[in-house]
Image: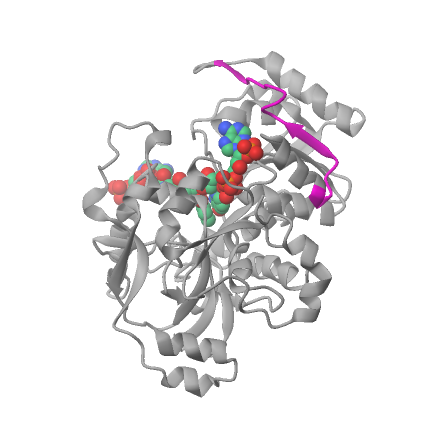
Amino acid sequence: MKEILEAIQSQDATSQDFAALKLPESYRGVTVHKDETEMFAGLETREKDPRKSLHLDDVPLPELGPGEALVAVMASSVNYNSVWTSIFEPLSTFGFLERYGRVSELTKRHDLPYHVIGSDLAGVVLRTGPGVNAWNPGDEVVAHCLSVELESSDGHNDTMLDPEQRIWGFETNFGGLAEIALVKSNQLMPKPDHLSWEEAAAPGLVNSTAYRQLVSRNGAAMKQGDNVLIWGASGGLGSYATQFALAGGATPICVVSSPEKAEICRNMGAEAVIDRNAEGYKFWKDERTQDPKEWKRFGKRIREFTGGEDIDIVFEHPGRETFGASVFVTRKGGTITTCASTSGYMHEYDNRYLWMSLKRIIGSHFANYREAWEANRLIAKGKIHPTLSKVYSLEETGQAAYDVHRNLHQGKVGVLALAPEEGLGVRNHEMRAQHLDAINRFRNI
Ligand SMILES: C/C=C/C(=O)SCCNC(=O)CCNC(=O)[C@H](O)C(C)(C)COP(=O)(O)OP(=O)(O)OC[C@H]1O[C@@H](n2cnc3c(N)ncnc32)[C@H](O)[C@@H]1OP(=O)(O)O
Ligand SMILES: NC(=O)C1=CN([C@@H]2O[C@H](COP(=O)(O)OP(=O)(O)OC[C@H]3O[C@@H](n4cnc5c(N)ncnc54)[C@H](OP(=O)(O)O)[C@@H]3O)[C@@H](O)[C@H]2O)C=CC1
């Protein structure tokens, strides 16, 4: 591993030098263990502690298959899917690995008693498998997390529709919270060269997801002038949705839960910011009954910001707690686009407000390769910026996931893998200098 790191840091190692490097037999990766999936049985979701279930283990290097690449991971980031994995909700991810393992001889590699997790990385290609021509050892890359087989016609218009669509590092093994990761080569994209490793690793999953959900024609197809209600606007997804709304000439109406988070949204350029905590919205009277009066109070508040207009697009992900309000505040003909249900997946809303006002609910999940590429291109061009707040070591990943689980974080939380310190990997200093304030906007808040 030392030689790999030296080659990466030397900056003059050639592709041949990288190809000649001896690969280690094992590497360190953040795992959950199959024999621990019941460890939190009986506990409330909130009480399930990722620090107890996430381990840093030495694991054998997987065999490299056709169309795949082994990547030296310099940095990764924590996504909420890793929180779900670590608390074994809504399902243990070992079921996904078992199912994937049944697909072919090659996919059997993924079905192991441990799961190396993580769905983001920035690093350097070490080896490519047969059939990979577009990428070479030594290439500096980020990886998006869409894993597809593409053997069915279903995925050939939109790869997210492939019946064998999986999220790498969640529904597959050998993820990015590790020193080495195994990816399909069509997950690779160029690393934005004005960013450090940890900054480059931060946007991937959430930026691509927000791009499809809000901007792409597969999602809400946002246009100039749209009023976009963004829940968790300074969180992982929301911090990118807010930037897309602003960059695309829309008006974000940002919802957050503290004055600090409200300030971050204003610093990004948003003017309409609602502190849901300070304003005390209680959309549910009790566990079973919603309160339409609170939906109306929320809608009135939005109208104060918009000069009386209602919401064109709701960027939804909290789920059960907010969905009734989201459907209500959407304008006639507007769109609620949802990619998650953090607070509960059995949603309730008053359907009269949906059908009588011709609203649409769109389900959205990650992004296809093209969408992920377009989202990464916007980062590389400095049009959209990483929202990295805090960086942890690989050993501290449990704490990093705990912070995200408890909503103690801002934007994205980074994890250093092989990178010995923060700030390395920047190749275009001039461009970086132009965007430094925006790149650092979320740091250490
Ligand atoms: C990029 C980052 C993303 C995120 O962070 S997303 C947030 C984290 N992710 C999640 O929380 C999602 C976790 N995943 C799940 O909860 C589950 O993954 C799903 C609920 C999405 C699906 O569950 P499953 O068990 O895979 O599927 P089933 O449909 O419940 O069961 C499969 C069986 O149901 C049969 N079936 C499917 N559709 C039909 C139908 N229309 N009519 C009759 N049967 C059907 C199948 O054939 C199969 O059957 P047979 O078990 O016998 O093989
Ligand atoms: N399908 C897909 O492709 C993807 C799905 N996801 C899912 O989306 C969800 C959010 O992910 P991510 O943005 O990275 O997570 P974060 O925790 O970084 O951000 C989510 C934000 O949502 C807000 N929030 C949380 N709970 C509630 C609630 N009950 N009511 C209102 N607001 C709430 C919080 O902001 P505040 O407290 O400031 O209001 C929080 O910071 C997760 O469930 C994740 O698994 C994520 C990426 C891709």
User: Percent x, y for residue 202?
Assistant: 52, 55
Q: Is residue 85 left or right of residue 362?
A: left
Residue 276 falls inside the magenta stretch:
yes
Answer above or below: position of 231 versus 68: above
Q: Name the image quarter holding residue 81.
A: top left
Is residue 129 visible in this depiction of the protein?
A: no
**For the C terminus, which image quadrant?**
top right
**Where does the magenta region start and end?**
267-285
Is residue 324 visible in this depiction of the protein?
A: yes
User: Percent x, y for residue 203?
Assistant: 55, 54
Answer above or below: position of 91 versus 183: above
Name the image colouring.
one colour
User: Percent x, y for residue 294?
Assistant: 61, 15
User: At x 48% / y 86%, what residue is drawn?
Assistant: 14
Q: Nearer the viewer, residue 60 or 187?
A: 60
User: At x 23% / y 49%, what residue is drawn?
Assistant: 33
Q: Nearer the viewer, residue 405 or 166?
A: 405
